[in-house]
Image (spheres, rainbow, N blue to C red):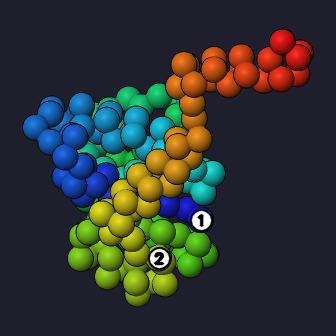
Amino acid sequence: MKYIIDGYNMIHKMSQLRGKALRTQREGLIAFLERAQEKEERLKDLTVVFDGRRDILPYPAHSNVKVIFARGTDADAKIGQMIESSSFARDIAVVSDDRRVRSYAGRHKAKKISVKEFLKKLSSSCAKKDAFKLGGAEAVKINQELERLWLNK
């Protein structure tokens, strides 16, 4: 599934990004999505669309999050163009709370996901995966116990 994210729409719903400079907000969103990609295989194809020109934010070339600036149009229209130009709109999930974007996605049979729903799914799946990670002290105790059992100490 290809995810297309309405960048500023998502930023405005993320409390941890509120009150920061616009560039910092964009960088924070991209960093958040990169961390989510590391934990969620299904998020390997992520595109974030922002209003503006590309030269506003030089994003890292090594990032797996594709960043598009809607040059000469707005992000809503750019997302619409992306859906329309896809031969498999049903394989696209659009993350936005914008009525215009959601309506366009629905008319073209793309999946619509609210920002709140997307963030909730990310946080619950990432929390489940993080639940199995051990802190340093727990890992040391387990290793000591395994050593004792295996080596009959």
Report which residue position mark 1 lands on: 1
Quadrant the C terminus occupies: top right
Which residue sits at x=19%, y=46%? 15
Q: With respect to residue 94, does 66 lie above or below?
A: above
**In the image, is residue 88 above or below residue 34?**
below
Which image quarter holds the N terminus? Answer: bottom right
**Disc 2 secondary structure class:** strand
Q: Which mark is residue 56?
A: none
Q: Nearer the viewer, residue 24 or 133?
A: 133
Question: Does residue 96 appear in the picture of this structure?
Answer: no
Where residue 139 appears, as percent x and y from the top left, is 62, 23
- Asked where in the image residue 121 lies, by quadrant, the reply is bottom left
Residue 32 found in image quarter: top left
The residue sitting at 56% across, 78% down in the picture is 90
Numbered circle sitting on residue 111: 2
Nearest the eye: 77 or 140? 140
Residue 49 visible in the displayed image: yes
Q: Amino acid at mark 2?
A: Lys
Outermost right residue: 151
Real-space Cα separation, disc 2 to disc 1, in angstroms: 10 Å
Task: Indicate the position of residue 19 as horizontal and vertical percent values.
Answer: 10, 37
Sort mark 2 into few (<14), some (14-19) or many (20+) by Cα contacts within 10 Å: some
